[in-house]
Amino acid sequence: MQNDLFQTSASSDQSPWLDGLNDPQKKAVQHLDGPLLVLSGAGTGKTRVLTSRLANLIATGRAKPWNILAVTFTNKAAREMKERVAAMIGPMVDQVWFGTFHALAAKILRRHAETVGLKSNFTILDTDDQLRLIKQVMELNGIDPKRHPPRMVLAMISRWKDKGLTHDKVSLADASNLIEGNGADIYQQYQQRLSDLNACDFGDLLLHNLTIFNTHPDILADYHQRITHVMVDEYQDTNVAQYLWLSLLSQKSRNLCCVGDDDQSIYGWRGAEVTNMLRFSEIYPEAETVRLEENYRSTGHILGAASGLIAHNESRLGKTLFTDDAHGEKVRIHGFWDGASEARAVADRIASLQRHGEFSPDQMAVLVRAGYQTREFEEVFIKLGIPYRVIGAKFYERQEIRDAIAYLRLIIQPADDLAFERIINTPTRGLGAKTVSLLRDASREQGLPMLATAENMLAGTTLKSAARNSLSQFVNMVLHWRGLLDQMPHTELAMQVLDSSGYTAMWQKEKTPDAEGRLENLKELITAMDVFDNLQGFLEHISLVMDGDNNNRGGEVMLMTLHAAKGLEFNVVFLPCWEEGAFPSQRTLDEKGAAGLEEERRLAYVGITRARKQLYISFASSRRVHGLWQSGIPSRFLAELPEEHLVEETEQGMAPGTAKPVTFDNMPIPSAAGGYGPGWTRLRERRQTGFVPSRAPAENKAGLTGISDYVIGDRVFHLKFGNGNVVSVEGDKLTIAFDKAGEKKLVASFVERAGKQ
């Protein structure tokens, strides 16, 4: 009965799954044979196209359900796709091969495990187990884990696997970058240990599949009979191994349908190769390319801003989003004096939108470039009672922040046993669970805190020499830090603690993207401390912040990184911290050059296209970055946004004729070689009044750069810090003793002579 219904429906020119599709969507859905590339812009209905095409394949009899392989990157996406197709074709959907790359590869591997030296009941190791195993291999080879952190070694092996490289395929050049040229040997031994344990890691799932297909053509031929149509979502995020896997499975039929958006390729740092998508037509000359450009999410002005920005990328296939909806509100660009003003303004706007019933909190989001940038927003949200949720760990809940705070708590309160236990072996000092257990038991017997108990234990003979030496070093460090409490500023003490304890060095040795983020967070912690008079006051603040941050039953404002926001949408989006060095990330530019800049621009494009109704982009004239005040040049991306889609606003005092540091009229123009391009010149030309300050030193009338005309003793005024006296002058840098804010270092252009405010 169901098949008869399908035949009837399929014979109609307008099948149910074609209803409501625009012409490009319909073209993609009706293309059932041969390679197909669907360039799907943000909000253009790609999921509907995928599901409708899958239903059409089955309804037309072009493929049986069990002949279709539908690949996604997440289990959530796979479930959503399956549910949508089920609503169209019913229970037949259960026979379609739905799943993530890893899930489908694991299914295939269990069928043919013996061909790669495994049994079908093999274990898939998690990250902790992988680390333990690589540590064992390194220990057997006498490799110092302090010099070559195991996590870094494992990350390198994972990258090789993502590229489809077995240990014998790793080039000498690549191998030389790991363990003094012995990386390939360690990789081989690690794989042998996995085999001995009848186990594999996540990278092996695809890598073993590739080995099976390349060395057993009969098995590959069997899958060519089983699978006649392959469909993959988010193709721009595939790595080399995933590309090879898809290519092999579709090698005979060439019925490969790839859906994605090259403009949203933002995961290069974890192995994604946007070239997989850019070269699709070269690899498949007969391929049909369909562009989905009609956006059903955002207003015309938001789309215009996004399209104008991404057009500056050269490595792209090209498409222009449009919408039939009204233009809506223009994108608002806001300039602020400092980061605190920016955070407060964002919070005030959110509160206003909620108060007037325009949008609920869960319809709004703040998207930042780096995780550490959430801290300032979290604190102001808590103060104003704005419910929020951080996607990922909240700032003060992150591992590295909790560790750092534990060190500081123990210095202030030596009876804090929870803090003591958290950091006694972090970083590793050879004080494991056995030593901690001895200390805990002795502490209970003596009725003393664990730190005092440790001092007493050092005077006895209970501990072995190695543990004794390590414990002695730790206790002496803590006592030394306590002695410095009243002798140096608390921020300097905190930095000394993190450095001399080896904690910052621990993360520096990791050499992973995650480790870099943790180091950024630690620097931001120091910045947060500086506004408090002492360490005790800061720790009390932390306690209050954590206590006031209760879960709300109602809607919550989303606070997350731009990477985490991909695939989501909100009625109102705030994009703060758009300054050079922060966004685009200077680290990315230094490491990847022009390719890195294009990926950063794609990330900005993703951020803009998350907004449905309203979009706010902001920058700060000065910002506390890792404990130091820095003046900021607005992001080059602001210069690339089409003017007709923007409304520009600035804080009071940042207009011409006031204390505004530098306008576009007098800003030095960076050279094109520096990566700014003609957009910067264009923006300066069109902003006659100016709204963006710069950290580049302004030229004085004599033509000299970076020379201040202030002298020691001058009375000056700053919009935030008030009145103060200049106490030292170094080029265009002033040290100012403010009447109420204390001593600050500022660029001369950020202040004016007192009496002019």
Image (spheres, rainbow, N blue to C red):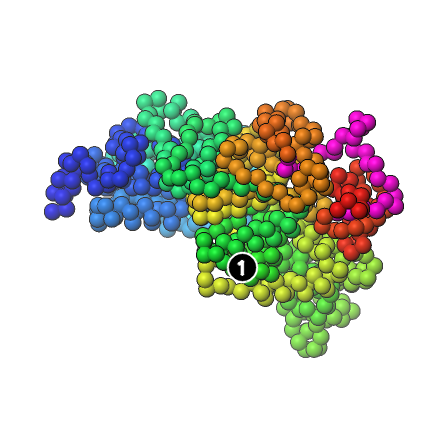
- Which one is nearer the viewer's eye here, 590 or 555? 555
User: Nearest the camera: 60 or 198?
Assistant: 60
Q: Is residue 223 left or right of residue 189?
A: left
State the residue at coordinates (53%, 49%): 366
Q: Is residue 235 left or right of residue 543?
A: left
Q: Is residue 238 visible?
A: no
| Residue drawn at point x = 55 percent, y = 62 percent | 385
Instruction: Tell me where residue 189 appears, x and y as whole percent.
Output: 53, 42
Number of marks? 1
Task: Specify whether residue 709 is painted magenta.
Answer: yes
- Compared to residue 307, the image places residue 437 above or below, namely below
Check residue 313 for magenta coloring: no
Q: Which residue is at a point 38% across and 49% down the rendered structure image?
A: 76
| Relative to 315, residue 460 above or below | below
Q: Is residue 177 above or below residue 522?
A: above
Q: Secondary structure at mark 1?
A: loop
Q: Alpha-carbon neighbours of circle 1 within 10 Å: few (<14), some, or many (≥20)?
A: many
Q: Quarter of the image holding residue 232?
A: top left
Along the horizontal axis of the image, is 91 left or right of 190? left
**Closest to the observer, 262 or 444:** 262
Q: Amino acid at mark 1?
A: Ile
Q: Position of residue 345 (x, y in %)?
A: 59, 51
Residue 448, can we see it?
yes
Which residue in the structure is indicated by mark 1?
386
Identify the residue at image location x=19%, y=39%.
15
In the image, 298 versus 449, the foreground residue is 298
Read off the magenta span: 690-718
